[in-house]
Image (cartoon, rainbow, N blue to C red):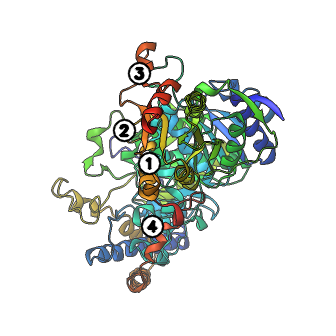
Amino acid sequence: MKQMTYLEAGREGLAEMMREDTSVWALGEDLGRGGVFGQYHGLQSEFGKDRIADTPISESCILGSAVGAAMMGTRPVVEMRFSDFALCAVDELVNQAAKARYMFGGQTRVPMVVREPSGLWRSSAAQHSQSLEAWYAHIPGLVVVMPSTPADNKTLLMESIRCDDPVVYLEHKSLWDFEGPVDDGAEILPIGKARVARLGKDVTIVSWSAMFHTSMEAAEGLAAKGVDAEVIDLRTLWPWDKKTVFESVCKTGHLIVVHEAVQVGGFGAEIAASVTENVFSDLKSAPLRIAAPRIPISYAPTMEDEVRITAEQIIEKTLNRVGK
Amino acid sequence: MDLCSYIMMPTKNFDQRRYAQFFKQMCRIRAFERAAIKAKNEGLVLGAIHPSIGQEAAAVGVCENLNKDDILLSTHRGHGHTLSKGADPSAMMLELLGKEGGNCAGKGGSMHIADFGVGMLGANGVVGANINIAVGAAHAIKLKGENKIVVCIFGDGAINRGPFLEGLNWAKVYNLPILFICEDNGYSATTHTKETTAGDGPVVRAQSLGIKAETFDGNDIITVDQAAQDYIARVKKSGPHLLHFLTYRLEGHTSTDPAAYRPDGEADEKWSNDPIARCRNLLIEDGVSAEQLDKFDDEATVEMTRVYEIARDASFPPALDAYKDVQDIGNPQTEAF
């Protein structure tokens, strides 16, 4: 077992895959100097400039060329720098990568990973802070992965690279320095499987990415108030682990979904609706979403905090919902 | 760009056998598209088709110079390119009719026609989107150290999309084995490209990135053939190049577009520059009999009539095939909702 940061774990996962499979390569802006956050630090000296490729600031070509390279049998890992910048390549992701296998009738596969650092991070304002995972979950053909721990950032990245379909891989920028155990012998959960991180009997809290940690913090606060919360880290948004969520809700009778993205049209709505449609009779209260207001993200901390979900909010709203 | 300023290749050492073969291929493309338009008019082709009637020389003159394992990417107007690369016309017509046995299993139709088995990596429904994908295919070839090239065909409208700049810059930066071909039919959908394009077009834009590029008469089969040979050799030696072929779309943007926006008489005048008729004249001048050429044309019509009948009589795919080939993880057979 090793202790490492979320950032280091992702780097190690990529390096291990590149050693294992010579068809794996990474491309993006500034990768030779380690990438904008240091996720690629040292990799160009080990793997060379062809396999850790510095690209022009050409988002649509970074993503689009990866589609062509994937169709030709390589496994590109695409670095988009900030998830917000990936919007310059929406056609390449949505119309091309996600659709090529299907619209060509299964003649080809697009085994690529699109890494998109996501979420709130140090007063970065409206174009460097967004959480857009619900958009990707909406697109047939894409797998959507959002790791929350260092162990997951290694194993889920490796599984995403092994996947024969395009994976949108959303790492949270606030977690880069988050430390945790890696390679500790714990069961490696595949893509599509949620993790029940805290067992509880009174309420189910479903979350992912950075909000998973906030939810865990809230669960401790709730315990002090006599509410035993079960916390599920969803890990992947598509496919999402309905079975684990339904089973938990059937046990607790209450569902709270917490996410950093805008609440309107967010993935929490999908989870709440699915739970309502499938296990309605087991619910003791209406499912509750705790998510951001539909406003752009501000620069000033006072206004930025308006979109930030805190453990205190989760505790308060959960207590109200479960009637304690 | 002055339409008269293009370069004509001198006609010397005329290879009758070679151009008779090219003539046959052009007749096959024309016959395929005539059959497809008939099927469209009869309600058998359900979606839009974009015929390349009048543009066959660029398709044939380029693709006849490629190896089977060379890679080709095309546009929404891609029937001619796909046939020229060696695709089975029956599978193509089945696809146009959305039938079982189509190249894309009935999921793509005309705008997504593809045959990966012959290195044809797809037409594309989004103008210019194939440029970035083609550049990536060439990047993979370079990474793997393979000895083949990518040919990426797009229209004059595509040069005003971002991927033209991003893709050409990328190809030059990494010195990739790719030949860009701008098939310039003068129209961006239904608007004259000149009205919406600043500067002198694809050649000077490519040259500004250090990519060698020239304009040629894309309706003269000999010119296209010789330019393709020359440029394919250059790509193999020194990376990306661009060919600009002047041609003309003799029919509408789609088969149901009457193209009333064109000046009176323009299309009639351009029919005198039909690449198939020009090739026919060259062959007759070289001593091939009109009967022989008519026979080639008739054979193409017979072949494509048969292809039409096969497609017409075939079945649609089962509805539940809609759930196949979406993705492996989260298989929609069980996870679509």
Residue B34, image x, y percentages: 33, 74
Q: Badge 2: how crowded within 10 Å, few (<14), some, or many (20+)?
A: few
Q: Residue at image x 68%, y 42%?
A: A157
Query: Which of disc 3 and disc 2 is earlier in sequence?
Result: 2
Q: Residue at image x 32%, y 58%?
A: B249
Residue A264 got which mark? Answer: 2
Q: Chain of mark 2?
A: A
For numbered disc 3, what is the local secondary structure?
helix
Q: Is residue A302 left or right of residue A241?
A: left
Amino acid, disc 2? Val
Q: Rounded to the nearest whole Å, what is the CA distance between mark 2 and mark 3?
A: 15 Å
Q: Is residue B9 left or right of residue B118?
A: left
Q: Rounded to the nearest whole Å, what is the CA distance between mark 3 and mark 4?
A: 46 Å
Dot 1 corresponds to which residue?
A: A284
For numbered disc 1, what is the local secondary structure?
loop
Q: Is residue B97 left or right of residue A175?
A: left
Query: Which of disc 3 and disc 1 is earlier in sequence?
Result: 1
Residue A317, image x, y percentages: 44, 31
Amino acid, disc 4? Lys
Dot 3 corresponds to which residue?
A: A306
Q: Chain of mark 1?
A: A
Residue B107 got which mark? Answer: 4
Amino acid, disc 3? Glu
Give the answer, above or below, for where B192 lies relative to B68. above
Query: Which of disc 2 and disc 1 is earlier in sequence?
Result: 2
